[in-house]
Amino acid sequence: MNLSTKQKQFLKGLAHDKKPIVQLGNNGLTEGVLAEIENALSHHELIKVKIPTDDRDEKALIADAIVRETKAHKIQVIGHTLVLYKPSEENKIALPKR
């Protein structure tokens, strides 16, 4: 499923006032962190993940790895925060039509 620009803008608006649910620690992206991200995505559908690194390339690699492993949609990266969306079975968030 590809998201249209309109749908991404809608999700950005919903994510604006949310706090990061998962924060990477000193160990970086571990199996436990990925499991926690998967759990949060299945429960919330739209989450923020805090990636505390100042290296842009490292941050991009971590964000891409999270997207690849969770099969979620990367909505945006602002500063140290990654916004992810993955629809669950219940479809809690009703996306606008394309």
Image (tube, rainbow, N blue to C red):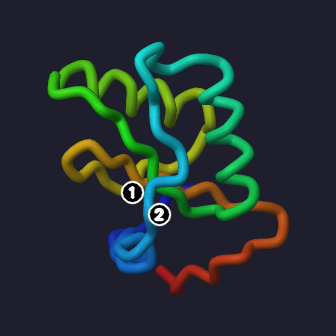
Q: Quadrant of the N terminus?
A: bottom right
Q: Nearer the viewer, residue 2 or 72?
A: 72
- Crowd rating for badge 1 (residues with CA inside 10 Å; few <14, some 14–19, many 20+): many
- Left or right: 7 with respect to 16? right
Give the Cα distance between marks 1 and 2. Answer: 9 Å
Element marked by disc 1:
strand
Q: Nearer the viewer, residue 68 or 54?
A: 54
Q: Nearer the viewer, residue 35 or 11?
A: 35
Q: Which residue does the image show at 83% across and 63% down from the upper left?
A: 89
Q: Amino acid at mark 1?
A: Ile
- x and y percentages locating residue 95 in the rendered image: 56, 80
Element marked by disc 2:
loop
Q: Is residue 23 above or below residue 24?
A: below
Q: Are marks 1 and 2 in contact (CB under 8 Å)?
A: yes
Labels in figure, total: 2
Q: Which residue does the image show at 35% across and 35% down from the upper left?
A: 51
- Which dot marks residue 3? 2
Q: Amino acid at mark 2?
A: Leu
- x and y percentages locating residue 56 in the rendered image: 16, 27
Asked where in the image residue 11 lies, by quadrant, the reply is bottom left
Q: Which label sits in the foreground, 1 or 2?
A: 1
Q: Which residue is mark 1?
A: 75
- x and y percentages locating residue 21 in the rendered image: 54, 53
Q: Which residue does the image show at 45% across and 30% down from the upper left?
A: 24
